[in-house]
Amino acid sequence: MTAQTDTQGTVTTVYKVSGMSCGHCEGAVSSEISEIAGVSSVKATAATGEVTVVSAAPLDDEAVRAAVDEAGYELVGKA
């Protein structure tokens, strides 16, 4: 599991997402995940397929999967 609790009381989790190939893809995935309650920042990188999410508490994997699906991509799992 790649979730880390930072000293500020936030959790950073890195997910693998397949299908992202450009900046538009990164924006679509970031936008959908940003709508999940408790998320403070999202950074998607198409080149690696990684999405780094900072949140107040660990996120429900199914909520993240639903957000990625809504954006039109596939959540592979945690990096």
Image: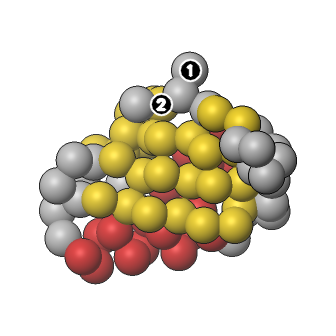
Identify the residue at image location x=53%, y=28%: 2
Q: Which residue is mark 1?
A: 1
Classify mark 1: helix, strand or loop: loop
The residue beneath circle 2 is 78
Three-letter residue code for mark 2: Lys
| Residue positioned 46% across, 40% down in the render | 15
Q: CA distance from mark 2 to mark 1?
A: 7 Å
Q: Which corner quadrant holds the N terminus?
A: top right
Q: How many discs appear?
A: 2
Element under disc 2? strand
Residue 6, percent across and down?
70, 42
How dense is the environment of label 2, judged by Cα within 10 Å: few (below 14), some, or many (20 and up)?
Answer: some
20 left or right of 43 in image: left
Please indicate whether residue 10 sits to the left or right of residue 61 in the image.
right
What's the residue at 63%, 55% (across, down)? Answer: 54
Q: Is residue 71 visible?
A: no
Q: How is the image coloured?
A: secondary structure
Q: Is residue 11 left or right of residue 52?
A: right
Mark 1 is on which residue type? Met
Q: From the viewer's perspective, is residue 2 above or below residue 49?
A: above
Mark toward the start of the polypeptide (2 vs 1): 1
Residue 33 visible in the displayed image: yes
The quadrant in which residue 47 appears is bottom left
Up-down: is 40 above or below 24? above
Q: Quadrant of residue 72?
A: bottom left
- Crowding near pointer 1: few (<14 within 10 Å), some, many (20+)? few
| Residue reaching furthest to the front | 7
Residue at 82%, 47% in the rendered image: 9
| Residue 13 x %, y % | 57, 41
Q: Which mark is residue 40?
A: none
